[in-house]
Amino acid sequence: MSLPVAAPRRPRRVGRVNWTGLATLYWRELRRVLREWLETVAGPVFAAGLYLTVFAFALGGARNSAEGAAVLSFILPGLAMFTILERAAESTVFSIVFDKLEGIISDVLMPPLTASELVAAYALAATSAALITGVPVVAFAVLVFDMGVAAPALALAFAAGGALMLALTGILVGLWAAKWDHAAAFFAFLLIPLTFLSGLFAPVEALPDVLESVVRLNPIFYVIDGFRAATLGIASAPPMAGLAVVAAAALALWVACDRLVASGWRLKP
């Protein structure tokens, strides 16, 4: 008695975009962040809440005055946005550096995914993780410190655009970094100074003219300033112009990431 012979399986057609592979890598990266939620979500939320509380107590009785309330309300959107930007960069930097150092980056490069699909999966997963982290921070600022949200759609646009921009920056840093010290140096000597010198704690108009001009060259300034415009209704630059700067920076970073991943720079032995 002959056994039935199974029909040969046809190879699955991928098409112009490997949506299945892209979604698989996206969910893999997002789950990697959410699996360590105590460190990746709860930690940044707690730190942001602590910063806000310390600033409030540092103002003392002045926080009930018009000047104190203005200072605190100015700082709130910046700290919320800083939490989002830092989470976006950390997600891609540490994911890529970990895979490289553990020797499992080849498992990511082996499936039939183009460079654009790899970049999209990493960047969009990090952007999603950053927005997930930012939601409780913004909620804390709104519920505890009465931070308003004048234009929710604009706030989401700047939060998502800024997170995408920093996620792509994190991909570049992850490609470049050969060890954890390189990743730590990026945060200590580049990201934190650029964020602090972007109108986070004080209006750029209060800076000397030369320093103000330098700060306005920093794309992070437009992210924080635009998010502040969407929450408080005040801005140092036109919000639409800020969105254009953020979009242009994200596009340039996306092209750079795509080219470097396609070339296998610091990915392939």
Image (cartoon, rainbow, N blue to C red):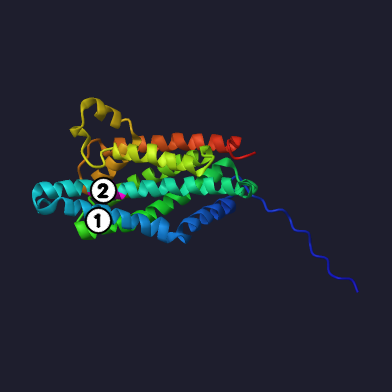
| Label 2 – label 1 distance at C-alpha | 8 Å
Quick one: 236 or 93, which is closer to the camera? 93
Q: Which mark is residue 45?
A: none
Q: Establish if 247 lies above or below 146.
A: above
The residue tagged 2 is 77
How many other residues sit within 10 Å of disc 1, few (<14), some (14-19) or many (≥20)?
many
The residue tagged 1 is 141
Query: Helix, strand or loop at disc 1?
Result: helix
How many other residues sit within 10 Å of disc 2, few (<14), some (14-19) or many (≥20)?
many
Quick one: 91 or 246, which is closer to the camera? 91
Figure quadrant of the N terminus: bottom right
As drawn, the residue found furthest toward the bottom would be: 1
Left or right of 61? Residue 190 is right
As drawn, the residue found furthest toward the front would be: 181
Residue at 42% over, 49% down? 127
Report x, y in % for residue 242.
Answer: 31, 37
**First reached walking from the N terminus: tag 2 or tag 1:** 2
Amino acid found under the numbered disc labelled 1: Ala
Q: Which residues are magenta?
A: 76-80
Left or right of 169? Residue 226 is left
Query: Helix, strand or loop at disc 2?
Result: helix
Amino acid found under the numbered disc labelled 2: Pro
Q: Establish if 121 lies above or below 238.
A: below
Whether label 2 touches label 1, CB < 8 Å? yes
Report x, y in % for residue 16.
Answer: 60, 44
